[in-house]
Structures are given as structure tokens and as C-alpha cells.
């Protein structure tokens, strides 16, 4: 996965989460709807620490490479999953995966990790994408080569196709899926959704064997998911997912109570919009402006000078529009677009 965001750093967060075999098994079982998946022995899944380099590409020990066996096979046939994480569109992803798969194949030859027939085991390049817009880049290397369909040169061109899991296609996750809960929380635009799914996740990971994954999810919620939605996670005594869910739920209730005491008739999800409208129509522009400023600071921290200037000069209609945009914005700049 190739996240470049700051916060905890999505790259580190996802590598940490998907270093747990139970989450990778869940991802394969729930989000690769191919008939051959039933032939995979998911219990044989293991992490491969393949280390290899190239001039323009570097793979390290921490990269996401897994292998597993096929069921009911007399041979030790391994399928290698080359898992890549992506948060931005990359039109050359098929070329990148071709290069990575080639490097992995060379590594397998050097390490003599071949099939009983002395051949390379199959490799499945898998990309997990969590960007804001649906993935539109080509999945097939051949589509990146400028040749007519009937060209005799096709037989000599490199071939590679990768499997894409686009989180935006699963805003509701999938019932019983741990990775589906991750997708829902990643795609959540409103705090209440995150808190509700966190409760489901806490229930799903109760078993003792999930202790390490629970801790990793707690770190991810504390440092990535909750701050992105402006939820406070500053209580160091919280050490499990259920406590985190209860604390965040309590904070939301406190916010809703605060908004209602200001005369708002709706909860947090609609409070900003109605608070601005009521405050402005009653001539309390300064109060409504302060309300918006507090919500911006709660979501994004101290406001830069350019934001302060915009707020100070904004007319009623503009403030209302910014209030609506804040509900779905993931970055401060998106509020003022």
C-alpha cells in the first residue's frame, strides 16, 4: 500500500493492520469473489519477507507478500499474494505491478522457492485502494501499450493484470467481515458512522486470538480515523476498542446536548447546518461565526490566517455553504472550495 498521508501515516497504519494474518484471510474470503478462492487453504497463509531491489523500485522486508497452498493438492503449490496499498490514482499501476511481480519471481528463483516441477509458482498482484474517487486506471498492462488489437506484435508484449479492491465500492462493508468494518470506517464522512462501526468491530474481535489485531485497530482509530473526523482520543487510559467506542459515543452525546442547549433541534449530523441557519436568521451572526470556527478547529486544529480572514469577511450565504461542506470535508481546503 502506498499511502503518503501524514497523521499516523496511512502507509504504516495499513502495513500494521495487514501484517495480521486474520485480516488478510478475511480480505481474501470476503472481497475476492472468484470461484478459485474456494480452492485456497486459508489456514496455510503465511507472511513472506522477500527482500529485493531494483534501480527504480525497492522492496523491503516490511512489504506485503503472502503465500498459501491449494486444497486437495498432492503438490506443495503456493500462490503468492503481492499486496499493494494505494490512496491515489496511478495510471501506470499495471506497469508497477508487472515490475514488482518480476522482481518477486527473480527472488523466488534465487531462493529456489519453485514448484516440484522446478517452475515458478503463480503470483496474484492485489491492489487495495482507499481513495476518494472510484478507481479508473487500467487493470491490464496491455491497455497501456499503443498497438491495434490485431497487431502481430501483441504476442511479444508483456502481460500483467492485477486484482483491484476499491474500498469506495463497499461503503456499507460486508456482514461479518473485519476488513469490511475497516472499509466502512475509512470511508466514514460523519462521526456517528465511525462510532457505530467501531462497536461492531469490537464485538467481532473479542476472541483472545485477536488481541494483537485489536491493539493495532485501537492505534489506527486513535491516530488516524478519529482525528480525521474531529473526534478526540486524548484519554491515555483507553486500552481497548469497546472503551474507545464508549468514550467517543459519550463525547458525541455531550456535543449533541451542547448543540440542543443552543436551541438546535437536530443532533450532530445536522447541527452545524441548522445552527448556522438559525443563528444568522436571528441576527446573531457573531455567535454563529464562532460556532463554525470552533467546529473547524475541532476537526482540523488551529486555523491558519487565510481561514481566519475568510471567516471574518464571509457573508451569511457563504457561511451557510461552508457549514454544509464541513460535514463531508476531509481536508480543511475542501470546506472552502
Image (tube, helix red, strand yellow):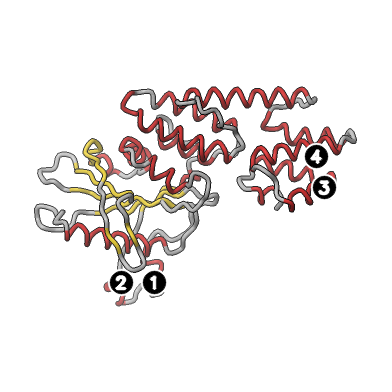
Tag 2 residue: 157
Give the mark, 3 or 4, whose residue is nearer the N terminus.
4
Q: Position of residue 39 (x, y in %)?
A: 23, 41
- Residue at horizontal 78 percent and vertical 33 percent from the top: 275
**Label 4: few (<14), some (14–19) or many (≥20) C-alpha neighbours in 10 Å:** many
Tag 4 residue: 289
Q: Picture quarter containing residue 120?
A: bottom left
**Label 1: few (<14), some (14–19) or many (≥20) C-alpha neighbours in 10 Å:** few
Q: Kindly report which numbered mark, 4 or 1, lies closer to the viewer in this rendering.
A: 4
CA gap, disc 4 and disc 2? 61 Å
In the displayed structure, does residue 34 sit left or right of residue 192? left
Q: Tell me if label 1 and label 2 are in contact, CB under 8 Å.
A: yes
Q: Kindly report which numbered mark, 3 or 2, lies closer to the viewer in this rendering.
A: 3
In the displayed structure, does residue 172 sit left or right of residue 103? right
Q: Secondary structure at mark 4?
A: helix
Q: Kindly report which numbered mark, 4 or 2, lies closer to the viewer in this rendering.
A: 4
Q: Secondary structure at mark 1?
A: loop
Q: Secondary structure at mark 3?
A: helix
**Front residue of this view, candidates 64 and 145:** 64
Q: Picture quarter containing residue 229?
A: top right
Tag 1 residue: 145
Q: Secondary structure at mark 2?
A: loop
In the displayed structure, does residue 130 sit left or right of residue 20? right
Q: Position of residue 7 (x, y in %)?
A: 52, 45
- Residue at horizontal 10 percent and vertical 43 percent from the top: 74
Q: Picture quarter containing residue 51?
A: bottom left
- Residue at horizontal 73 percent and vertical 25 percent from the top: 258
Indicate whether 57 appears above or below 122. Answer: below
**Front residue of this view, candidates 63 and 174:** 63
Indicate whether 121 appears above or below 316. Answer: below
Tag 3 residue: 312
Amino acid at each position: 500500500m502506498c499511502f503518503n498521508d501524514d497523521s499516523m501515516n496511512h502507509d504504516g497504519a495499513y502495513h500494521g493492520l495487514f501484517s495480521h494474518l486474520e485480516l488478510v484471510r478475511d480480505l481474501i474470503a470476503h472481497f475476492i469473489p472468484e470461484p478459485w478462492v474456494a480452492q485456497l487453504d486459508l489456514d496455510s497463509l503465511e507472511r513472506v519477507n522477500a527482500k529485493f531491489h531494483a534501480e527504480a523500485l525497492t522492496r523491503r522486508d516490511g512489504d506485503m507478500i503472502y503465500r498459501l497452498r491449494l486444497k486437495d493438492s498432492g503438490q506443495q503449490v503456493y500462490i503468492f499474494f503481492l499486496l499493494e496499498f494505494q490512496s491515489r490514482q496511478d495510471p501506470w499501476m499495471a506497469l508497477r505491478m508487472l515490475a514488482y511481480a518480476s522482481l518477486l519471481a527473480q527472488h523466488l528463483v534465487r531462493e529456489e522457492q519453485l514448484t516440484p516441477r522446478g517452475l515458478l509458482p503463480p503470483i496474484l498482484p492485489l491492489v487495495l485502494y482507499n481513495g476518494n474517487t472510484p478507481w479508473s486506471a487500467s487493470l491490464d498492462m496491455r491497455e497501456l501499450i499503443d498497438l491495434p488489437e490485431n497487431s502481430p506484435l501483441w504476442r511479444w508484449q508483456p502481460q500483467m493484470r492485477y486484482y483491484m479492491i476499491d474500498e469506495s465500492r463497499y461503503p456499507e462493508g460486508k456482514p461479518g467481515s473485519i476488513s469490511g468494518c475497516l472499509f466502512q470506517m475509512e470511508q466514514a464522512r460523519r462521526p456517528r458512522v465511525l462510532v457505530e462501526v467501531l462497536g461492531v468491530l469490537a464485538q467481532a474481535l473479542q476472541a483472545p486470538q485477536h488481541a494483537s489485531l485489536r491493539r493495532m485497530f485501537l492505534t489506527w482509530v486513535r491516530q488516524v480515523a478519529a482525528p480525521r473526523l474531529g473526534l478526540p482520543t486524548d484519554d491515555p487510559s483507553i486500552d481497548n476498542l469497546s472503551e474507545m467506542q464508549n468514550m467517543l459515543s459519550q463525547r458525541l452525546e455531550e456535543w449533541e446536548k451542547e448543540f440542543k442547549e443552543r436551541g438546535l433541534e437536530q443532533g450532530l449530523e445536522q447541527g452545524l447546518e441548522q445552527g448556522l441557519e438559525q443563528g444568522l436568521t436571528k441576527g446573531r451572526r457573531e455567535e454563529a461565526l464562532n460556532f463554525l470556527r470552533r467546529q473547524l478547529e475541532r476537526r482540523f486544529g488551529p486555523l491558519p490566517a487565510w481561514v481566519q480572514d475568510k471567516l471574518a469577511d464571509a457573508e451569511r450565504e457563504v457561511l451557510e455553504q461552508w457549514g454544509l461542506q464541513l460535514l463531508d470535508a476531509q481536508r480543511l481546503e475542501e470546506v472552502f472550495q
